[in-house]
Image: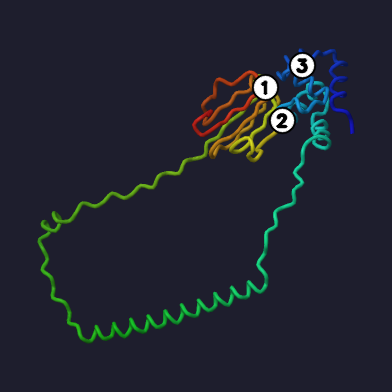
Amino acid sequence: MFQIGESLREARTRRGFTAADVHKAIRIRERYLTALEEERWDMLPGEAYTKGFLRTYSDHLGLDGQLYVDEYNARIARHDDDPPPFVPHPSAETRHVRRRVFAGLAGVLVVGAAVAGLAAWRLGSATHDTTTPPATRPQAPTGTVAAALPPPKPAKKHAASRGPVFTSISATRGRCWLLVRAGGPNGTVLYEGTLEQGQAKRFPISARLWVRMGNPDALDITVAGKAIGGLPTFPANVVLTRAGAA
């Protein structure tokens, strides 16, 4: 166990950096840097952002970012300790009753099918014995039949299913912490980490993606090969759909 804030402040001081220097380098606001050094977690925008800031700040100072995130998770982060919901299971007696009901229904269906088949066989035999062959119907000339028949209906074309659409997020102008969730801010986490300069990540878009960026200036984002413009210059969110940025 170690003091996160004190360790960050000492590392920054040893390297001769001011908070303003760090802000210019990693684009995290000075008030958030101060909150990290003073461990004033309530001044930060949320746990996901706090972890990203910790990782980016500590990596910039040459420290082990994962170590700081692990310490935060162990001491500060909230944990969901609720027990799993109780799901009642049917008793053995209930299952036995169900099997007996299903067996009875199956027997009724078999008997009904046998009776219906016997009746159909008798009716078919009686009809065969008393009926006479039908008279041959005169055939109309070929041209008349062709004219009377309606034109064939065109075959229905099945709509082609939409192919997958992908987004590419590239750190082309520096490093950037990134959090990607499916659907929205509470959706499944698809990626959380820091993209080093030159690295890229590719994600499929089924409906939409929610993306949190620590340093949007460093990123280039495309959807289906089309570039997304107008990204902010400070940590922010963006929602990506199959059509682009929402």
Which residue is disc 3 drawn over?
22
Q: Which mark is residue 46?
A: 2
Is 96 or 239 nearer to us in this picture? 96
Compute the Cα span from label 2 to label 3.
Answer: 21 Å
Rate crowding at label 2 as few (under 14), some (14 to 19) or many (20 or more) other CA atoms within 10 Å: few
Q: Which of the two discs, 2 and 1, labels the residue nearer the N terminus? A: 2
| Residue at x 82% of width, y 30% of height | 68
Give, as a three-letter code, the residue at label 3.
Answer: Val
| Vertical order, 168 against 34 (above or below) | below
Task: Point out the tag, 2 or 3, that comes first from the N-terminus.
Answer: 3
From what the image shows, is residue 14 above or below residue 225? above
**What SS does tag 1 mark?**
loop
Relative placement, left or right, of 106 versus 17 is left
Q: Nearer the viewer, residue 84 or 195?
A: 84
Q: Nearer the viewer, mark 2 or mark 1?
A: 2
Q: Could you say where residue 196 lies in the image, as x and y percent from the top left? A: 71, 25
Q: Amino acid at mark 1?
A: Asn
Answer left or right for 177 relative to 229: right
